[in-house]
Image (cartoon, rainbow, N blue to C red):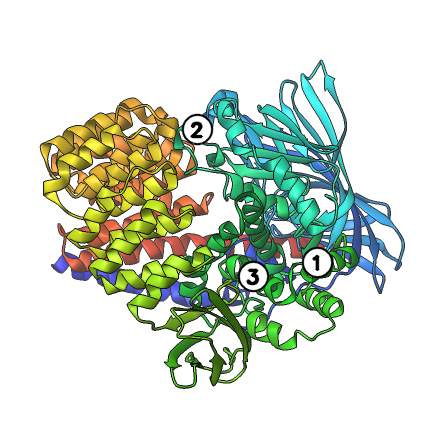
């Protein structure tokens, strides 16, 4: 104990000394350059700005007219060297210093049409000083030679990183602010220019970029291929894209437009599944939008471990290779929605682009909504409404209930804050409500006007509002104010009663949400459909007050009273109706949403009559989404009657419904049904549904389940989907009996898993290891995966080491926590160390806390030494100049 006290005193003295030392560095530690004080620039790091002030697009000092990139990626060293030439014209006043975003780039030379006096590279910004100011309107250029080992924006996938050699490739990702990490640029979406890419790669590789290919040639001596691309229509900087490597290509067309699909050779046999809808989507969008596809060609390229689902670079969409799927999954797996979303961006986001991130919904809301419209084109109106329903119930309504941020929100801390439900599904719903109120034809006219007027420019929300107002002749101030510039959505309570004497339906519509500075009282049309015998009565009432009462004359007592039958309002609806009315709605509603709402209302009743009605819908409703929701509702009821209804349902032809039935059945815990569950799982051929059955088996400890899970590790499936499901089930079981099986998967079969799949195996192995000796053995198996080269595997290995709870893992984790060249791994290691320290019971709490403090002190000390050295160098340089 005395030694612990002594160490604490020593640490306290050191901390005090370091605190005093830090004071002299206060100004040095807080950077006030334009880069660090600009929301857009710091967003690429995810750095909190530390203030609540609104953020706006930066003022453009020059008009960038053209960007020319001449680059050479080195696949062995994973570096990029190149020359960037930027042609520009000063705006409003002459400029003597040109400022460019440039993060961790090594700048070797800068030249210009006006002689360059000097340049300064801060590590985040490149400042180019000219010998004379460049006059307003004078076309000028700068050429910058640079190289880097990119930490973002430019990515390699090579054998040294754990990827198949035949799939070697590299690719770029610009949105939101990552282009600056591999070439100097004005990295913000309020600037558009034409672009040009010249890329030098090994002679057997393919290069794809924006626009049209001007040509390619091969240098036989260097064995390098040079490929030249030109995008001759202006687009924003984040849409510049280069992809190079080994790909298999499929070709298609939509009219005269050429379509290209590129995928990795190791999975290309399945690629036709993923791109089967592209031509159809293209034709539909050109008809629906009323403006021809505005670019030269359209390519799609899949990439190993892409950092997102997809990215709508102009004329070349990049996609996760997880979008490739096998036919065995039937219609459960599809790339159709991702395909449709990214293609819609070629108009909404590329042709017309949001000026700053607060108006991101003008990109993402349109892409989301037009994806739903294509579903309706392909499968009928109910498919569009079901997509909107799922967005509302799964994302917008739960996300927005307690969120005071509007869609257009300028107080974000980094650009990533805007990429959430507000820009995507809520933005989509705003467009749906506009289309519903205006009608399809007038809506289309407004969209055509919007795109034509702002073609190849950047926009903010007022431009879209103006297009709707000019087309319709009505004001949309209140609509945009409540839905776009204020937060949330209405909570609507509806009550109904019938007056038999007067044959009147009496309605009360009340908005029950809290109204304040952030959330308005909403104005919206409320439509009711009343079925009175063979006659349907429709009535629409404009709701503008907190509470609104009205009467509707009807020929007889309504047997069905439905609110918003066409599903046109985004709101939480509380409409309490008798069971008979919900039964009637399930039987008679024309649209799928009415039947779905009836199913979930009846499920809450839990009566035998309700269960029978839901089971009937599951067995025979014509729309798959209703059958899916019926299976889901029965699964959540947790009664023997509901389980019996699920089990007795005839086998469904639609795999999506079979999946929902499986999910519903396995949600119950019924040991007496285990034999039936195992038998059904063994009979199923679809790996996506098998995965669901396996997941449900995790709660059973029966020997037959153990045998089945172990056998599933050996089953062949695309991307090892079935084996991965078995791994997850083993982890959920909590049983250490599976440790040898998991260890074998790591040591003998790791190459069969995707990076994320292998990560699941590593974490499961760590979680299930119990005794000290077993944990040590697992540590030896897990640790080598730190050298895998794939970030997902490395992070999983780090997390697994922390989960083991062994002090022997601390030095390994410490080395990664202190590493500064990879922020992701460093953060993962710090989290693992925290987990390790939290779980450690072998040492006194004082010593554990002391160790944590010492670790932080060591980091701070290293940082201060670096700053001191940097300051001394600057002082030496200043003294030499003097």
Mark closer to the observer (3, 2): 2
**Residue sitting nearer the eye, 248 or 378:** 378
Q: Is residue 799 above or below residue 741?
A: below
C-alpha span from label 3 to label 2: 33 Å
Locate the N terminus by quadrant: bottom left
Q: Residue furthest top?
A: 220
Q: Where is residue 234 drawn, in percent x and y?
A: 77, 47
Q: Judge by depth and name the residue closer to the eye, 874 or 393.
A: 393
- Say which residue appears at 60% left-offset and 50% top-offset: 123
Q: Nearer the viewer, residue 812 or 559?
A: 559
Query: Where's residue 479, x and y in %?
Result: 60, 73
Give the quadrant of the C terminus: bottom right
Left or right for 714, reference 128: left
**Residue pointed to by mark 2:** 327
Residue 471 coordinates in the image, percent (x, y): 75, 66
Q: Secondary structure at mark 2?
A: helix
Q: Label 1, secondary structure: give it.
A: helix
Residue count near mark 1 (Cα–Cα under 10 Å), binned few <14, some 14–19, many ≥20: some
Residue position for label 1? 447
Separation (CA) of disc 1 from disc 2: 37 Å
23 in relation to 344, above or below:
below
Residue 407 lies in what quarter of the image?
A: bottom right
> Residue 83: x percent and y percent?
72, 37
Q: Is residue 293 above or below residue 751?
A: below
Left or right of residue 421: residue 706: left
Q: Residue at x 39, y 46 (%)?
A: 826
Q: Nearer the viewer, mark 3 or mark 1?
A: 1
Local packing at callout 2 (Cα closer than 10 Å; few below 14, some 14-19, many 20+) is some
Residue 95, picture quadrant: bottom right
Label 3, on which residue?
427
Q: Viewer-proximal residue, 691 or 53? A: 691
């Amino acid at each position: 104990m005395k030694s612990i006290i002594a160490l604490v005193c020593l640490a306290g003295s050191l901390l005090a000394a370091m605190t005093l030392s830090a004071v002299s560095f206060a100004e040095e530690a807080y950077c006030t350059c334009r880069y660090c004080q600009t929301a857009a620039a710091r967003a690429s790091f995810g750095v909190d700005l530390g203030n609540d002030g609104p953020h706006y697009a930066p003022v453009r000092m020059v008009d960038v007219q053209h960007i020319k990139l001449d680059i050479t990626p080195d696949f062995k060293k994973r570096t990029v060297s190149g020359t960037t030439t930027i042609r520009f014209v000063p705006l409003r006043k002459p400029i003597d210093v040109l400022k460019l975003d440039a993060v961790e780039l090594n700048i070797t030379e800068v030249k210009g049409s006006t002689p360059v006096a000097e340049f300064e590279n801060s590590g985040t910004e490149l400042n180019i000083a000219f010998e004379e100011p460049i006059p307003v309107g004078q076309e000028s250029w700068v050429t910058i030679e640079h190289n880097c080992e990119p930490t973002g924006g430019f990515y390699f996938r090579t054998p040294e990183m754990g990827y198949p050699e035949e799939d070697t490739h590299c690719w770029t990702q610009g949105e939101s602010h990552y282009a600056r990490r591999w070439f100097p640029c004005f990295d913000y979406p309020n600037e558009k220019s034409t672009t040009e890419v010249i890329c030098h790669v090994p002679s057997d590789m393919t290069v794809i970029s924006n626009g049209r290919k001007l040509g390619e040639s091969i240098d036989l001596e260097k064995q390098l291929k040079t490929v030249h691309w030109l995008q001759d229509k202006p687009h924003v900087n984040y849409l510049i894209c280069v992809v190079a490597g080994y790909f298999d290509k499929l070709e298609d067309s939509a009219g005269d437009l050429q379509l290209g699909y590129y995928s990795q050779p190791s999975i290309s046999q399945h690629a036709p599944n993923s791109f089967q809808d592209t031509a159809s989507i293209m034709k539909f969008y050109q008809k629906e939008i009323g403006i021809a596809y505005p670019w030269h060609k359209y390519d799609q390229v899949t990439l190993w471990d892409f950092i997102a689902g997809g990215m709508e670079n102009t004329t070349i969409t990049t996609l996760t290779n997880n979008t490739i799927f096998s036919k065995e999954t039937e219609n459960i797996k599809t790339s159709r929605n991702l395909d449709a979303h990214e293609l819609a961006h070629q108009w909404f986001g590329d042709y017309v682009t949001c000026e700053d991130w607060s108006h991101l919904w003008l990109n993402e809301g349109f892409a989301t909504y037009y994806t739903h419209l294509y579903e309706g084109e392909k499968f009928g109106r109910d498919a569009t409404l079901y997509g909107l329903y799922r967005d509302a119930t799964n994302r917008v309504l739960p996300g927005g209930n307690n969120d005071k941020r509007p869609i257009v929100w300028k107080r974000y801390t980094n650009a990533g804050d805007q990429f959430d439900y507000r820009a995507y599904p809520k933005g989509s719903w705003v467009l749906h409500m506009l289309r519903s109120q205006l009608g399809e034809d007038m809506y289309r006219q407004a969209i055509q006007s919007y795109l034509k007027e702002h073609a190849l420019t950047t926009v903010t929300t007022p431009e879209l509002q103006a297009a709707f107002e000019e087309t319709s002749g009505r004001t949309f101030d209140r609509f945009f104010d409540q839905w776009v510039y204020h937060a949330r959505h209405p909570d609507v309570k509806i009550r109904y009663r019938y007056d038999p004497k007067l044959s009147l339906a009496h309605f009360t519509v009340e908005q029950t949400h809290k109204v304040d500075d952030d959330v308005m009282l909403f104005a919206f049309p409320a439509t009711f459909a009343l079925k009175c015998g063979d006659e349907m009565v429709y009535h629409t009432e404009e709701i503008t007050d907190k509470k609104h009462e009205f009467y509707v004359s009807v020929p007889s007592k309504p047997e069905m009273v439905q609110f918003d039958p066409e599903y046109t309002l985004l709101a939480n609806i509380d409409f309490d109706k008798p069971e008979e009315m919900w039964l009637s709605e399930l039987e008679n509603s024309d649209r799928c949403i009415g039947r779905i709402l009836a199913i979930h209302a009846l499920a809450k009743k839990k009566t035998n009559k309700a269960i029978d009605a839901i089971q009937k819908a599951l067995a025979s409703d014509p729309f798959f989404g209703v059958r899916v929701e019926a299976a889901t509702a029965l699964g959540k009821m947790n009664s023997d009657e509901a389980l019996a209804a699920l089990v007795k349902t005839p086998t469904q032809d639609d795999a999506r419904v079979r999946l929902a039935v499986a999910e519903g059945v396995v949600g119950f815990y019924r040991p007496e049904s285990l034999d039936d569950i195992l038998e059904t799982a063994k009979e199923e051929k679809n790996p996506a549904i098998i995965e669901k059955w396996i997941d449900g088996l995790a709660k059973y400890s029966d020997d037959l389940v153990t045998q089945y899970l172990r056998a599933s590790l050996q089953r062949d499936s695309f991307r090892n989907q079935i084996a991965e499901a078995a791994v997850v089930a083993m982890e959920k079981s909590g049983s250490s009996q599976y440790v040898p099986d998991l260890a074998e998967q790591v040591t003998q079969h790791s190459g069969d898993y995707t990076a994320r799949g292998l990560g699941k195996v590593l974490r499961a192995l760590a979680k299930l290891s119990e005794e000290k000796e077993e944990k040590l053995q697992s540590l030896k198996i897990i640790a080598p995966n730190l050298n895998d080269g794939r970030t997902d595997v490395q992070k999983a290995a780090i997390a697994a080491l922390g989960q083991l709870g062994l002090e022997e893992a601390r030095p390994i984790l410490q080395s990664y926590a202190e590493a500064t060249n990879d922020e992701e791994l460093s953060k993962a290691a710090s989290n693992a160390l925290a987990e390790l320290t939290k779980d450690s019971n072998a040492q006194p709490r004082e010593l554990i806390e002391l160790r944590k403090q010492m670790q932080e002190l060591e980091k701070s000390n290293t940082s201060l030494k670096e700053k001191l050295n940097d300051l001394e160098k600057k002082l030496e340089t200043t003294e030499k100049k003097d």
